[in-house]
Structures are given as structure tokens and as C-alpha cells.
Amino acid sequence: MRITVFRRLMAEEFGAARSETLAKDHVLSGLGGRTVDEALEAGVPAKEIWQQVCAEFEVPAERR
């Protein structure tokens, strides 16, 4: 998954402003205690990050 697709999915699910805040501030234990932005910078695949976000925020399967 490309980062642009990941960012679009985040915005569609959470809204543009909230998705940016979540990516910058919310620490996910499934990402080793990193934020989305930190995980992306560390080279974690966007698809893996999206799966962790979906699990953390209980995104319904049809939108994953």
C-alpha cells in the first residue's frame, strides 16, 4: 500500500483534521509504542500500520 493511499484511507475514516492528529499524537502499542508518523519514518509498511490503526479503533472489516 502506498503512503498516499494510506493517508486517504485515514482521512476517509477519521476526517482530515483528526487523521492528521491521530497520526502525529496517538501511540499504538502494536507499532512498538510509536505513532503512525514515527512508524512510517521508521520504514514500517503502510499496510501494516493501517491494520494496527483498524484494530486499535475497531474499524469495521468492510472498511479495512
Image (cartoon, rainbow, N blue to C red):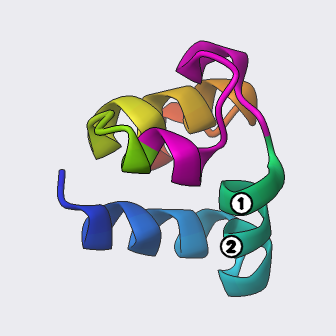
Q: Farthest residue in the bottom direction?
A: 16
| Neighbour tally class for label 1: few under 14, some 14-19, many 20 plus, Cα within 10 Å | some
For the residue marked with disc 2, what is the amino acid? Glu
Q: Which residue is drawn at 68% across and 73% down?
A: 20
Of residues 8 and 31, the one drawn nearer to the viewer in this rendering: 31
Q: From the viewer's perspective, is residue 38 above or below residue 28?
A: below
User: Which part of the image, by quadrant, shows the C terminus?
Assistant: top left
User: Residue 62 location in percent, x, y?
Assistant: 44, 42
For residue 36: magenta?
Answer: yes
Q: Which element type, helix, strand or loop, lies under badge 1? A: helix
Q: Residue at x 66, y 84 (%)?
A: 16
Of residues 58 and 62, the one drawn nearer to the viewer in this rendering: 58
Query: What label does residue 58 carry, if any?
Result: none
User: Residue 45 location in percent, x, y?
Assistant: 26, 37
Marks 1 and 2 in Cβ contact (< 8 Å): yes
Real-space CA distance between mark 1 and mark 2, rounded to the nearest whole angstrom: 6 Å
Q: What is the quadrant of residue 7 in the picture?
A: bottom left
On the image, numbered disc 1 is attached to which residue? 24
On the image, numbered disc 2 is attached to which residue? 20
Q: From the viewer's perspective, is residue 18 above or below residue 33?
A: below
Q: In this view, does 1 lie to the left or right of 52?
A: left
Q: Identify the magenta region.
A: 27-39
For the residue marked with disc 1, what is the amino acid? Lys
For residue 42: magenta?
Answer: no
Q: Which residue is drawn at 79% across and 72% down?
A: 18
User: Residue 61 location in percent, x, y?
Assistant: 49, 32
